């Protein structure tokens, strides 16, 4: 009998001990502190401070902002002197963001001042141990993207509809300036682009970084462009097509960007000012007054002046064979005898001389005879050296296949 009672008491003891140990384990689990999630920005955990975010207002100065944080004029003067080699306090501008980090105790004392002149860079003035200033850059990441589409209006508008930074459009036009006349691209013409985009802190979009590959349909043919640096020592990239031919020719296709041809070279055309039928020995490109006019090839300014018919004009001699002329300028930016480079701005669009509206009349001479620049087969630059060709083809072929694949998929 006593044995059975003892056994029951022993079992009760074991059970109570087990329950007690479980409760202690639970208690121990509950008292383990959880890690506090960080809120890191600009290299600081914002949970350690009282934070103030604001923008520079009209009339604000670095000194006035610090004085609002209970720093007197002498203290501000000393701070400015200590940080001047890194941070020019006069550089702060209205509308730019700044952040002030203050201590979390009763003093609420300023610890750090952060100023952001742009999305990427920021200045840190640290007051904690000794007053020091640093210029820092937010981390950048690059993400690759490949798209295909068809022109629907302007190139920039089409890119914007595809959620691509429209600022890429003039960069594309510059790359293709020697091989595509963008005035002749039509609605529905296909294209494909591979490019990288920048992101600040991996989340904030910061525009297109570089174009890795492209093609545009032009006159029924795909014109490809791939950046490549044949000389590894210089790392200077040029754009080549799928056969390794350079896109950079002796002449640009046109003296303006993204405008309209309003009149072509013609043996007989009704002149809108003189009201007579006569030859029109040039190509008219309409554009707003003040639009930059570029010389289509390097050369020497042969003439720069004014006549009743031409208005303000410039004529450039490129070599023994070719010369070009640019009429009706609102302003001439070069002088006779000056050497100019391809793409250099030599004047601004206007309507001087016999012109009904702002445009540039582009004229072209070959061996002293005026010819139609749009129909002329112009000389091209030197092709890629054969010793680089295999390396280029190995680099280019995967990019070309990707462009074609994305383009084919977009048609389905």
Image: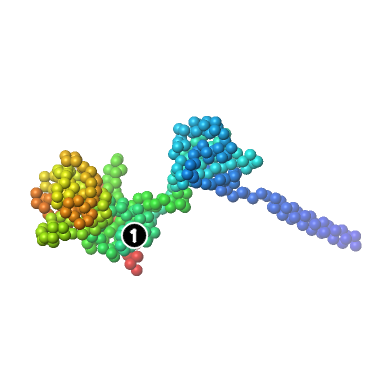
**Quadrant location, the C terminus:** bottom left
Foreground residue among 386 and 264: 264
For this view, does 224 lie left or right of residue 282? right
For this view, does 246 lie left or right of residue 15? left
Q: Does residue 143 appear in the picture of this structure?
A: yes
Give the image location of residue 360, x and y in percent. 20, 53
Q: Does dot 1 land on a helix, a strand or a loop?
A: helix
Residue 405: quadrant of the picture: bottom left
Residue lying at the far bottom in this picture: please name it: 412
- Write the residue at 18% across / 59% down: 263
- Write the residue at 44% across / 47% down: 119
Q: Does residue 395 appear in the picture of this structure?
A: no
* Pointer 1 residue: 157
Give the image location of residue 112, x and y in percent. 55, 39
Residue lying at the far right in this picture: please name it: 1
Residue 191: quadrant of the picture: bottom left
């Amino acid at each position: 009998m006593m044995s059975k009672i003892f056994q029951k008491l022993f079992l009760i003891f074991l059970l109570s001990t087990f329950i007690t140990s479980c409760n202690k384990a639970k208690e121990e689990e509950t008292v383990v502190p959880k890690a506090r999630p960080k809120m890191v920005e600009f290299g600081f955990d914002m949970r350690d401070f009282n934070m103030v975010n604001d923008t520079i207002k009209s009339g604000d100065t670095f000194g006035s902002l610090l004085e609002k944080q209970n720093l007197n004029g002498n203290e501000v003067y000393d701070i400015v002197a200590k940080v001047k080699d890194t941070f020019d306090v006069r550089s702060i501008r209205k509308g730019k963001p700044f952040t002030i980090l203050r201590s979390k105790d009763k003093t609420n004392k300023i610890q750090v001042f952060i100023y952001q002149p742009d999305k990427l860079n920021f200045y840190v003035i640290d007051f904690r141990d000794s007053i020091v200033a640093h210029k820092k850059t937010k981390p950048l990441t690059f993400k690759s993207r490949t798209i295909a589409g068809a022109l629907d209006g302007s190139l920039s508008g089409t890119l914007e509809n595809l959620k691509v930074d429209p600022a890429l459009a003039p960069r594309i036009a510059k790359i293709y300036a020697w091989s595509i006349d963008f005035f002749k691209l039509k609605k529905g013409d296909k294209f494909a682009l591979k490019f990288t985009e920048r992101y600040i802190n991996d989340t904030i979009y910061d525009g297109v970084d570089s174009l890795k590959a492209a093609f545009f349909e032009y006159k029924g043919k795909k014109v490809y462009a791939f950046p490549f640096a044949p000389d590894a020592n210089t790392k200077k990239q040029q754009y080549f097509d799928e056969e390794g031919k350079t896109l950079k020719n002796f002449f640009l296709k046109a003296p303006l960007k993204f405008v309209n041809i309003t009149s072509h070279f013609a043996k007989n055309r009704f002149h809108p000012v003189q009201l007579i039928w006569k030859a029109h020995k040039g190509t008219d490109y309409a554009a707003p007054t003040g639009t930059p006019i570029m010389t289509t090839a390097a050369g020497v300014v042969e003439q720069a002046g004014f006549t009743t018919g031409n208005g303000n004009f410039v004529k450039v001699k490129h070599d023994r064979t070719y010369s070009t002329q640019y009429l009706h300028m609102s302003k001439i930016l070069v002088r006779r005898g000056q050497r100019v480079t391809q793409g250099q701005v030599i004047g601004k669009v206007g309507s001087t001389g016999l012109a009904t509206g702002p445009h540039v009349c582009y004229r072209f001479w070959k061996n002293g005879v005026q010819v139609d620049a749009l129909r002329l087969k112009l000389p091209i630059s030197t092709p890629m050296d054969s010793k680089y060709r295999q390396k280029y083809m190995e680099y280019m072929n995967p990019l070309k296949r990707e462009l074609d694949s994305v383009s084919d998929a977009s048609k389905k």
